[in-house]
């Protein structure tokens, strides 16, 4: 076997023994979840979450990952009615799941804008202890005042400063998690005191973004501290990841983008004095499997059509037109009325920076495209809605593709977003995982007990 | 309001017990209290004993900065962990209104109710001194300001729990509608120091409303389902319970600390514990002695209060005596009944499921 040790285009050498790490990112809400079929599990029932976590544990996944809800999405001032909505608090739900699972990592998405650092750090550390070292935190930021309307400090943080706050927040949390010396607690009830005097340090911060004085009430877990995931793709997000994260949950799933992203991130790691293997790259992905390539393609088509249904196509345009378009036929031409001039409001969820302005120009482009190709509303919306990167094929095809991704070190694995719960995940566990195992690219048993063990990450130093 | 010849029984399961020196008498390593194993043991024992409700005390600051435990798991995570391990006991963490966002707090409690299939309670905490508030970078609150804040947070939590009607999810395939937006409501709450638009991100809890337990000193009786009364004098206890019910609270519970004869006399155990760290007077009833004396005391309280919350000095010593002697004696006398498997906490407490303030009133048949 010939192995090159020179770093390839990904900033890391080819690794014939590289492993695929898998997580599931379950937001529990949103347009990607199909709810119309008879086989879909009740989305809010705790039984559904227990069943999913236990299924993924059977599939030897690294992590089960919950999204965060701060405000229910709306369309024109009313709750948006076409998507699955309603979900539990992530840390509460994962604490319950910790009691009925043994190995799988439990990752909570929690934002740094509308939380208090000491309070959130304490809840995460408690989950980490109760799960015996299986907790993770997916660090996200929020900047819009619409979401902030549910919180004491609604809309207080300027967009440009959200990663500054996030960085200080994470640093405060890490300091709290490291504030107990390893042997702080007495060995027996005969000791003079429960904790050795001086073995627990108070933590103080006093900037305009993070202010606290607190003493942690929990020691480090078996994995040191919760594993830190970071999902932002902006420059600020990448810097935060390179400084503090253990895992990046990136949006760069296409192979070429994944290669460029890995190279960029590894260069940033080096600047922060971190080794290339101290950060795992797990982009989001959806997976659609079939017994034959044709069956997989047909299924993918069906999924896309379910996800962008005729009523959703109308609702999508309503967001851009800022008007009630319910009288328009989704199978007919684009609305003939002029769109409202107001820029997009964030009430349907976070809007990417590039879409926050220039709405009218975009609509003009859509009109041209629809006219040129004679597209209906539905056809246009299916065309212009950004498509999540899907791996579509037989289990063997997808396994081959993934093995190539990990051995060239473009990624370390994937965070899968399910579209049908639980069946799309059952397919992965029962059909794709065995193919990966046959290729020597996937564990056949959990070797460690903690999430940090599963991800083969170094023990945290601070 | 329950029959005055019966009692509802709650037990606090925080740490190693209510006495600050309890950690010296557990028979295990002091740090073990912070493990899943310890929590499984305590919750399992309380449910097996037949308690109505387990509470989990908490604070934003360590339980002790002196010789005693500096460690404590956050209470909401403890209660949630207990949820799938149990099927009848109520689970009520102390969550503080002052150090968590009100919206998060309402979401966490609604989620606990879903995870426990309708057995969540909330012991309202209002920590507001300088060290508590420093954890969120804020200044201490006056008692008046804390009271107002507490009332506001309970009010907004209750509105948020109603913000989804029970029948909001319709899954109408023909129209493509997952939910009916007319049944999911903004709450548009404005309090003294904050406002919340809503709705909650979590659908209505199985119980409709999480059971709210308010310590009497918070003086929010009208907003509570259960008022927890720490009062050593029986007459004063009876008066405060009456006042709670007159204010609109459904139930009044007496707070009772217990040190039971367990191998050695309770009085001797207490002396040993107090020699290590004196147990500060919390203003609660305290019983020290044999199990049958506690049975007598509880029997005498039955006409006065609807329930009691017991605070065992040392869980490892007192919980087995409660389970083996006290609860069976009360049950034999018909003073106490175990919850039914699968029952909601509301139902175990004899309370009806609250109507939703946002739902159009149902036609008055029945």
Image: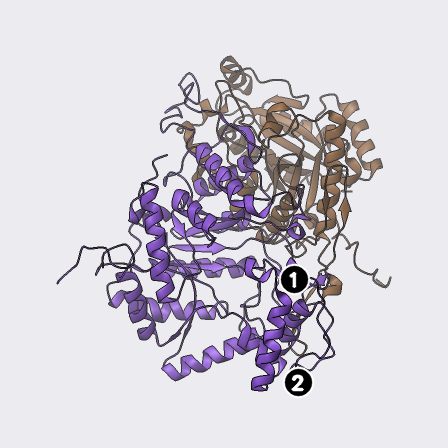
Chain colours: A purple, B brown
Horizontal relation, residue A84 to residue A21: left or right:
right
Distance Cα–Cα, label 2 vs label 1: 24 Å
- Vertical comparison of B218 with B207: above or below: above
Pointer 2 residue: A332
- Vertical comparison of B299 with A96: above or below: above
The x, y position of residue B333, in whole percent, is 67, 38
The x, y position of residue A101, in whole percent, is 43, 52
The crowding category of the residue bearing disc 2, from other C-alpha atoms within 10 Å (few below 14, some 14 to 19, many at least 20), is: few
Dot 2 falls on a residue whose secondary structure is loop
Camera-side residue of B20 and A347? A347
Chain letter belonging to callout 1:
A
Quarter of the image with the C terminus of chain B is bottom right
- Vertical comparison of B283 with A95: above or below: above
Horizontal relation, residue A154 to residue B221: left or right:
left
| Residue occupying the far right of the picture | B364
Q: Residue at x 75, y 39 (%)?
A: B152
Quarter of the image with the N terminus of chain B is top right
Camera-side residue of B92 and A276? A276
Residue B43 visible in the displayed image: no
Q: Which mark is residue A344?
A: 1
């Amino acid at each position: 076997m010939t192995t090159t040790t020179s770093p390839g285009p990904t900033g890391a050498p080819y690794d014939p023994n590289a492993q695929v790490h898998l997580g599931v990112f379950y937001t529990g809400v949103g347009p990607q979840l199909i709810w119309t079929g008879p086989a879909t599990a009740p989305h809010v029932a705790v039984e559904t979450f227990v069943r999913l976590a236990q299924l993924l544990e059977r599939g030897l996944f690294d992590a089960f990952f919950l999204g965060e809800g701060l405000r229910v999405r709306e369309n024109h001032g009313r709750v948006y009615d076409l998507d699955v909505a309603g979900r539990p608090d992530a840390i509460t739900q994962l604490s319950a799941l910790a009691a009925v699972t043994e190995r799988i990592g439990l990752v909570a998405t929690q934002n740094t804008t509308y939380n208090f650092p000491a309070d959130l750090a304490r809840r995460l550390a408690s989950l980490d202890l109760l799960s015996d070292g299986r907790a993770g935190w997916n660090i996200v930021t929020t900047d819009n005042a619409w979401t902030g309307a549910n919180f004491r400090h609604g809309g207080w943080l300027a967009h440009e400063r959200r990663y500054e706050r996030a960085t200080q927040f994470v640093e405060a949390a890490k300091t709290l998690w490291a504030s107990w010396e390893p042997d702080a607690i007495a060995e027996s009830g005969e000791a003079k005191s429960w904790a050795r005097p001086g073995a627990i340090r108070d933590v103080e911060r006093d900037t305009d973004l993070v202010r606290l004085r607190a003493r942690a009430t929990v020691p480090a877990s078996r994995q040191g501290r919760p594993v830190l995931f970071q999902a932002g793709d902006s420059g600020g997000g990448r810097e935060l990841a390179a400084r503090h994260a253990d895992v990046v949950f990136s949006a760069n799933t296409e192979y070429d983008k994944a290669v460029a992203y890995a190279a960029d991130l590894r260069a940033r790691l080096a600047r922060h004095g971190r080794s290339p293997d101290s950060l795992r790259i797990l982009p989001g992905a959806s997976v659609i499997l079939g017994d034959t390539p044709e069956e997989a393609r047909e299924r993918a088509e069906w999924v896309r059509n379910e996800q962008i249904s005729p009523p959703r196509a109308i609702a999508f345009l309503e967001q851009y037109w800022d008007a009630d378009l319910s009288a328009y036929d989704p199978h007919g031409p684009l609305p003939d009325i002029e769109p409202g001039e107001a820029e997009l409001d964030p009430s349907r969820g976070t809007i990417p920076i590039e879409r926050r302005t220039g709405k009218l120009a975009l609509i003009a482009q859509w009109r041209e495209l629809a006219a040129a190709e004679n597209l209906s509303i539905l056809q246009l919306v299916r065309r212009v809605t950004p498509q999540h990167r899907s791996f579509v094929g037989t289990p063997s095809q997808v396994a081959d593709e993934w093995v190539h991704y990990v051995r060239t070190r473009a990624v370390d694995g994937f965070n899968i977003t399910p579209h049908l719960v639980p069946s799309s995940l059952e397919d992965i566990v029962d059909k794709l995982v065995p193919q990966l195992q046959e290729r020597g690219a996937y564990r056949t048993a959990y070797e460690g007990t903690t999430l940090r063990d599963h991800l083969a990450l170094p023990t945290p130093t601070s | 309001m329950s029959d005055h010849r019966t009692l509802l029984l709650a037990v606090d399961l925080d740490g190693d017990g209510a006495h600050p020196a309890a950690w010296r008498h557990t028979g295990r390593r002091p740090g073990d209290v912070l493990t899943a194993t310890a929590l499984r043991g305590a919750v399992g024992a309380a449910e097996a004993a037949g308690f109505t409700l387990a509470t989990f005390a908490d604070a934003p600051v360590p339980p002790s900065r002196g010789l005693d435990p500096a460690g404590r798991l956050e209470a909401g995570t403890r209660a949630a962990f207990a949820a799938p391990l149990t099927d009848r006991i109520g689970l009520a963490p102390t969550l503080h209104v002052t150090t968590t966002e009100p919206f998060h707090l309402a979401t966490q409690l609604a989620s606990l109710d879903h995870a426990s299939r309708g057995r969540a309670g909330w012991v309202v905490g209002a920590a507001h001194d300088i060290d508590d508030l420093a954890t969120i970078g804020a200044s201490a609150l006056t008692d008046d300001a804390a009271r107002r804040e507490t009332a506001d947070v309970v009010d907004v939590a209750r509105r948020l729990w109603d913000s989804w009607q029970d029948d909001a999810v319709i899954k109408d395939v023909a129209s493509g509608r997952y939910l009916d937006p007319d049944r999911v409501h903004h709450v548009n709450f404005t309090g003294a120091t904050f406002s919340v638009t809503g709705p909650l991100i979590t659908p209505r809890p199985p119980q409709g409303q999480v059971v709210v337990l308010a310590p009497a000193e918070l003086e929010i009786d009208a907003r509570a389902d259960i008022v927890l009364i720490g009062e050593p004098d029986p007459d004063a206890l009876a008066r405060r319970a009456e006042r709670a019910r007159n204010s609109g609270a459904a139930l009044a519970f007496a707070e009772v600390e217990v040190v039971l004869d367990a191998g050695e006399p309770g009085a001797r155990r207490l002396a040993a514990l107090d020699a290590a760290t004196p147990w500060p007077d919390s203003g609660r009833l305290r019983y020290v002695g044999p199990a049958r004396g506690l049975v007598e005391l509880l029997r005498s309280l039955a006409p006065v209060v609807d329930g009691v919350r017991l605070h065992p000095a040392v869980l490892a010593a007192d919980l087995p005596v409660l389970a083996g002697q006290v609860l069976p004696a009360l049950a034999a006398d018909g003073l106490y009944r175990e919850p039914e498997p699968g029952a909601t906490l509301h139902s175990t407490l004899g309370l009806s499921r609250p109507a939703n303030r946002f739902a159009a009133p149902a036609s008055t048949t029945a």
